[in-house]
Image (cartoon, rainbow, N blue to C red):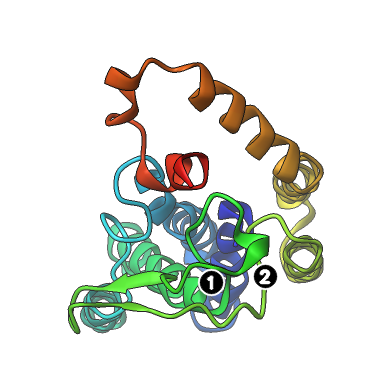
Amino acid sequence: MMATTHALAGMVVAGVTLVVAPEHTPVAVAAAGIGGAFPDLDLYADHRKTLHFPTYYAAIAAVLAAVAIAVPSQFSVGLAWFFVAAALHSRMDAFGGGLELKPWRGTSERAVYDHYRGRWLRPRRWIRYDGAPEDLALALVLGGICLAIYPASIDPVIAVVVGISAVYTLLRKPMVWIVERLVDALPPTLLDRVPERFVEDFRS
């Protein structure tokens, strides 16, 4: 799924603070949005493995949530929601597509790596690939929920995130064509520096 979809999912879940600790809602929403997108910073470094931890993030989030409940502060609440959203992201990726350059082909059996179990989780493809129409639809739903539950001051942020999602969806497949042309133009000595999923289709 798109990083923006994950960010919006984290922000929706952070809506719990509106009920239990409304004074901490701004930091909770910001931290959850950042935490929701954070795992995808490993895009060019063993994607969905380097910064994706489906089990460990959840364990850390549980401990930090307990701390935030016992000693609520801007820092403890924000840190807890960051890891809750990062854990949610890592779990959600198992319901998307695989890691291949053209995930709409459905050839990869690697969705996200579970370090605790020491193996790759298989993609369920409920969302066929990041940037698929159903991915955008989910982002729109999540964005709509954010617009409904949060103050109007956050509306521009939600609009920008949803807008980025729409643009990415439009460009998703053309971007693959661009990557293929770039890889095709690289000298063989540089191919080893390119992430494997960007060259595996090219080599086949």
- Residue in view at x 68 percent, y 34 percent: 177
Q: Give the mark, 1 or 2, whose residue is nearer the N terminus.
A: 1
In percent of width and height, residue 48 lies at 37, 60
Q: Residue at x 50, y 77 (%)?
A: 123
At which x and y percent is residue 152? 79, 53
Specify the amino acid type for callout 2: Arg
Question: Which numbered dot is residue 14?
Answer: 1
Asked whether, in this view, residue 111 is left or right of residue 156, the answer is left
Q: Which element carries disc 1, helix, strand or loop? A: helix
Q: Kindly identify the amino acid type of the residue bearing the numbered disc 1.
A: Ala
Q: Position of residue 16 (x, y in %)?
A: 55, 80
Q: Left or right: 64 with respect to 169? A: left
Quarter location, residue 193: top left
Could you tell me how far apart the alpha carbons at marks 1 and 2 are, in whole angstroms?
A: 26 Å
For image coordinates 35% across by 59% down, the residue present is: 74
Q: Which residue is mark 2?
A: 128
- Mark 2: secondary structure: loop
Q: Residue 173 location, x and y as percent? A: 73, 44
